[in-house]
Each structure stands twice: as C-alpha cells, then as structure tokens.
Image (tube, rainbow, N blue to C red):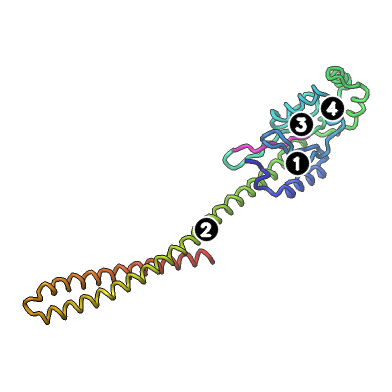
Amino acid sequence: MKIQDFCDMDEFERIMSNWAMATGLATVAVGADGEYISDCYNFTDFCIKYTRGCEEGKRRCEKCDQEGKGVYYCHAGLMDFGIPITLYDGTVLGNIVGGQVLPSGPDFDKFREKARELGIPEEEYIEALKKVKIRSKEKIEASATLLGDVINMYVRSCYVKKYNDNIIGKLTNGINEASKQIEIVNSVTKRIEGFSGRQKMLALNASIEAARAGEVGKGFTVVAKEVQGLANNMATASNEIKIAANSLTKTIQELNQ
C-alpha cells in the first residue's frame, strides 16, 4: 500500500511546503520503498551538493534516511529528524525526514576532517557549512513533531475516507442487487398468487363434481379439500413473502435517502 494510492498528493505537498516555509528546516517525505514522494524543501548545499554529492556520502545519507528516528545527528554532523508515517493500526507507509541544521556553532576542524574522509574539498565544504541554519534541539523537536502530527492526521483521514468510500460503494452495489432480487421476488409472488387462484377454482370445480356424483364422488371431495388446502397455504405464503419484500423495499429506500 502506498500513500499515493489514497491521498491527494497536491494537498500533501502543500502541507510540506507550508511547514518548510514557516520553519526554514529541510524536509522530504519518503515512501516505504525508500523513494521520495514529495519535493525536497530547504535542502542545503552542504547536504545535497557536497555530502550527498559524493558516492560514500550519499550511501551514508540514505542509510540515515532509512534508520533515523526522532531527532538525531546524521553521519555528517548535522541534526536531522525522522518521523514515521503510519496508519491507526501501526502500519508504516513511509517517513518524513529532514532537519539539516546545527544545534550550536560548528567545530570547523571536525567538519574539515569529515570533508577529508569523504573526499570533499575542505574549504568549499566549510563555506557551505557556514550557510547552515542554527536551531536549538528543542525547536527542532517541536517542529518535527508538529509536521509528523499534521501529516499523519492527514494521511489517516484520507485512508479512512477511501476505506469508507469502498464500503459505501459495496453497500450501494448490494442495495442495487437487492432491489433487483426484490423485483424477482415480487414477480414470482404474483405467479404464486395466480397459481393459488387457479387452484381455488380447481378445488371449487372438484367440489361441484363431487356433489353431482353423489356417493361415487367421495374421491373428488377428498381431492377438492387437498387442493383447497394447498391453495390456501400458497395464498398465505405469498402474503408473507409480499410483507417481507415490502419491508425490505422500505429499508432499501431509507438507505438510499
């Protein structure tokens, strides 16, 4: 299951964009398969151009994206966050990752060492580092939690709507099918009523013939009573079916309102 299957991704993108604009922090949404499902917002040259720009740096960054939880230091020394996107039952659909800030002024010597380790020009790396925003850990945590809460509420509400729409669709199909079945029941009931009427006539004729035949017609009398009883039973069953069908029709009409 993918978020894109049931979410309005334009609205999803709008939430991400507004949050990034309001906080100045970097962020991107990643699906359960590790693929980006949103634009990258406020990503720094330090991260994108330099750290992820080299093969080893990219490998380490992707590992952090997949494994990072809460607020944490990435392999390059910046503070990042990872917030899971989940459904109510705990199913993980992806992650919101971001941050790319410093909680305090950087130790330039430490970052020069990191540049040498990754094979990145030191001075260019340091110049890019100087443009990285500084935010307290508390502000990063608060901002990340807010984005996580809003995105999760949105995703879950979209999922519930999709789920409910499916149920309503199935119910509507069921109601339509039930309506067709009721039409068939009504048609069959009319036929039963017709049979019952003809059997009553047959019973009456048998009674008349029995009366005419006198002693010899006793057998006709027995047949007439049996036919009359069958006709009455059919009439009763037909009426019960009609009452049940009318009740079901009324229920269906109420559901369609």
Residue highlighted by disc 3: 80
Q: CA distance from mark 1 to mark 2?
A: 36 Å
Q: CA distance from mark 3 to mark 1?
A: 17 Å
Contact flag, marks 3 and 2 (Cβ < 8 Å):
no
Residue highlighted by disc 2: 173
Residue highlighted by disc 1: 38
First in sequence: mark 3 vs mark 2: 3
Identify which amino acid the numbered label 2 is placed on: Asn
Against 149, is 58 above or below? above
Q: Nearer the viewer, residue 90 or 234?
A: 234
Residue highlighted by disc 4: 53
Residue 37: x %, y % from top left: 73, 40
Q: Nearer the viewer, mark 1 or mark 2?
A: 2
Identify which amino acid the numbered label 4 is placed on: Gly
Residue density around tag 3, few if under 14, some if 14–19, many if 20 or more, within 10 Å? many
Q: Nearer the viewer, mark 3 or mark 2?
A: 2
Range drawn in magenta:
91-98
Q: Nearer the viewer, residue 247 or 64?
A: 247
Q: Is residue 231 left or right of residue 207?
A: right
Q: Quadrant of the C terminus?
A: bottom right
Residue density around tag 4, few if under 14, some if 14–19, many if 20 or more, within 10 Å? some
Residue occupying the point 24% across, 76% down: 200
Prevalent SS, magenta region = strand
Residue density around tag 2, few if under 14, some if 14–19, many if 20 or more, within 10 Å? few
First in sequence: mark 1 vs mark 2: 1
Q: Is residue 249 left or right of residue 141?
A: left
